Amino acid sequence: MLSSRGNRAPAALAFRLRSPALETTSSGMRRVSALLLAVSAALSTAGLAGGTAAAPMVRVQPLLVRPGEAITVTCAHFRPRLQVPLSTRPVAGGQFSRLGRVQATAAGAFRFSKTLSQSTRIGKYVLRACQRSCLTKASTTFRVSKIKPV
């Protein structure tokens, strides 16, 4: 077999070009391949249609709070009208404790305020917002301190 320059093609390439599988590809196989491609594209689009393309995001304000003070949790890019559980735990580890549950708007956003207990321990905490049984989640950290910064 000759290439366009008149040189012989490598044996492996010649084998691939003469492969019976390529010569016997039917229009039915091409249709099946096209159909599979269309189905996978449709499924990908359907997965994004329920929400937004951006990853879920969570923010806590203020980042430094004293026991007994309130925090405000702001989230975006969650599935529209989804019930979103919020939970916290110390960064050092342990089980997550339920902070609350809030429903996202039609745009997939929400705002939630919570006053921390006076008995909340001093330290750094992780706040987690989940969707789809926590397969998709967003998290951030905040700190509980005895002294408010100047």
Image (cartoon, grey):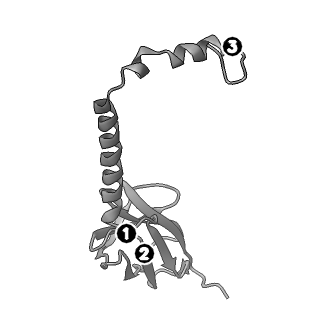
- Determine whether, in the image, residue 16 is placed left or right of residue 30: right
Nearer mark to the viewer, of 2 and 3: 3
Circle 2 Cα neighbour tier, 10 Å, few/some/many (<14 / 14–19 / ≥20)? many
Q: Earlier in the sequence, mark 2 or mark 3?
A: 3
Task: State whether residue 63 appears in this view.
Answer: yes
Badges 1 and 2: C-beta atoms under 8 Å apart? yes
Q: Nearer the viewer, residue 47 or 1?
A: 1
Task: Give the percent coordinates (x, y) of residue 65.
Answer: 53, 81
Instruction: Kindly identify which residue carries mark 2.
Output: 75
Name the quadrant of the N terminus. top right
Of discs 3 and 1, which sits in the foreground?
Answer: 3
Q: Position of residue 63 (x, y in %)?
A: 55, 77
Q: Alpha-carbon distance for marks 2 and 3? A: 63 Å
Tag shown at residue 78: 1
Q: Measured from the top left, where is residue 142 in percent x and y?
A: 53, 72
Image quadrant assignment for residue 115:
bottom left
Left or right: where 78 falls relative to 126: left
Q: Which residue is mark 3?
A: 8
Report the residue that reaches farthest toward the bottom. 150
Q: Secondary structure at mark 3?
A: loop
N-term mark: 3 or 1 = 3
Front residue of 62/137: it is 137
Residue under the point 31% across and 52% down: 43
Relative height, residue 148 to residue 144 (above, below): below
Q: Gap in Å between the C-alphas at discs 1 and 2?
A: 8 Å
Could you tell me the amino acid type at mark 3?
A: Arg
Name the residue at 49% across, 77% down: 60
Can residue 126 be seen?
no
Specify the amino acid type for callout 1. Answer: Phe
